[in-house]
Image (tube, rainbow, N blue to C red):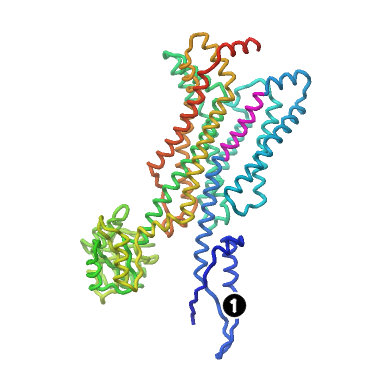
Amino acid sequence: MTIRMWFGLDVESLRSSGVDVDGLAAQLTSLLAQRYESSTAEGSPDIRLNSELGSTLTRVVAQQTLTRSILTIAALGPIAVAVALVILAARLVVQRREPWLELLHARGLTPAQARRMAVVEGTVLTGPAAVAGHLLAVAVIPGPYPAVAWLTTLFSAAVAVVALGVGAVHAGARRTRTDLSLHASRWRVAGEALAWTATAAATFQLLSRPDDEAAPGVDLLGAATPVLWTLTATLLVLRLYPLPLGILARWTRGRPGLTGFLGAARSLRDPAGGVVPVTTVLLGATLAVMGATLVGTVATGTERATWASTGSHIHLSGPRVLDPMVDELRAVDGVATVARLYEASDNAKVTLGGDERWVRVLLADPELMSVYQPMPGGSPVPAALFEEPALVLGGDLSTTSGRATVVGLGELRVAGGLRVLPGASPGSAWVLADVNRWRDRQPTATTALISVDPDADLREVAAAIAQLVPNSRVTNVADQLAQLRDSPTIDGLSRAFWILSGTAAVLMALSVIGSQLLGGGERRHLAAILRTLGLRPGQLRALAAWEVGPAIALALVVGVGTGIGLAALMLAGLDFRTLTGGGYSPTLHVHWPTLASVVGALLATMTMAVAVTSWSAGRTDLAQELRIGDQR
């Protein structure tokens, strides 16, 4: 005997007590695993509990695991750019102190003393700032935070302190350009080989593992593989980007004007204007484009999954859909077409090329083609199904041509194959045929798919149908799609991607400006010399733009391509079906308007950063720079 009872779940109580979904699922599993004794007049049977909440919690846990992995990857872009920005700020501080540090070194200051002095200064400056930032984050986004969150705060302060200490020791040292040389050291070659090997191994493991092997929490393999690919793409660009710059320098050498040739040559020679902008722009652009591509893919996958579940504008199920009911449905204002799905047999024998299989036989009205037409991509059912003696094989039946013999239908041509039949759940093996070709007893239809007129209000039509057929389940594609898109997982993921992309763009601009400020002294000294030779301020601004513009453009192009590739890799390696609300596995879909807006925003931000650095380069004080040069 089965008794169905309803117990409400107090979500607010769970939130206040700090019980997460994983803990609730574990408690429910423990509750359902026990046997409970009872005493009745007929004996003492054991009572076993069952609940439909378990499948919901399992789906929520899978959604949380996937979103945590995706957000971890997306957050690494702004984090990496922020770390580079902190290091740049420390180098700028050391650069401003270089005359003072050189004087102290000349008077006997040891490297250890310089390091301790910089560490103390960095601790005093960055420690309170890091703590204040942590407390501000907790105030803006309240919630339970583990004590380990303070490690991130300490790490951010430690990065600046270490950068200050290292810079103070090497202040005044002779600068070299070995980081841009094509003849790299053995350590660099070994590091790049190790990065490529780790990337290949992680990609193989990610693509070859089953979908159910993802660990709870953050999927470390799924999060590490895109990061490794981003790292290897950055190393490749740093290795190869001097080649197009060299070609550009040789191309501009014989052309009129000095700015193009001199700017490309300085971009090759000056590490402050080359490595940092390329690295930060590529990291930020890669993860911003990957996020935009995944958001577009999930949105499209959600729409396709909703249409596959509903089948048309409106899905009606429950009572037997007889001819009088079909006439009443067609009479509802706004209804365009009504098609029924019949279940003729749940275990019929089909013969395919000498092999026998037991399948479920489904039948459909010829109006099914018109009902499916509003779906994205049109009707998945071939038109030949209703134009000639034919059938469609579905599920695990891989044959899509030839002839098949089905009990109740006879021998028919195979018109095609489908993995899923929209609006139905026929199982793993099924066939679909025209109801007019069924030879056995009259089949039963309990499902009706309804399309509405283009100018009709879908929700009003669905409400009218629900009132017309009270003991039925009526769903419409608009409500189903809105429910999925407004869910905390999908909506929160989209918001997080846009916030992280905007943060990455701002940090990228600051890193470009900071890297140019780092080489500002040498640029101003060169500008003063060139001004004495007749170079105009506008040409100086163009020279500054030439120094960093080609490298940033190359990093943006590679970042866009890498971001789309990483999105495809994540779709192949992670199970995104939990986000689309069903068994539909989304495929890569590049939403070009969204991608164009993201790339346009990045390009506008980088253009603004280059314009700021170029504007400052054109305001060089000629007399002051020449006087400083004489003092040197």
Q: Where, by quadrant of the figure, is residue 174 drawn?
A: top right
Q: Amino acid at mark 1?
A: Arg
Image position of 480 (left or right of 199): left
Magenta-drawn stretch contains 549: no
As drawn, 601 above or below 150 = above
Image position of 581 (left or right of 374): right
**Front-most of 230 and 128?**
128
Please say whether residue 542 is visible from this viewpoint. Answer: yes
Q: Position of residue 119 (x, y in %)?
A: 72, 33
What stretch of residues is rendered in magenta?
79-96
The overriding secondary structure of the stretch rendered in magenta is: helix
* Residue, far bottom: 41
Residue at image coords 30%, 57%: 380
Q: Position of residue 34 (x, y in %)?
A: 60, 75
Please say whether residue 205 is visible from this viewpoint. Answer: no
**Front-most of 15 and 303?**
15
As drawn, 499 above or below 482 = above
Residue at image coords 77%, 18%: 107
As drawn, 318 above or below 454 = below
**Judging from the image, what secondary structure is the residue with disc 1 in?**
strand
Q: Where, by quadrant of the figure, is residue 461 drawn?
A: bottom left
**Front-most of 399 and 383?**
383
Q: Quadrant of the C terminus?
A: top right
Q: Mark 1 highlights which residue? A: 35
Q: Position of residue 130 (x, y in %)?
A: 65, 40
Q: Position of residue 138 (x, y in %)?
A: 61, 48
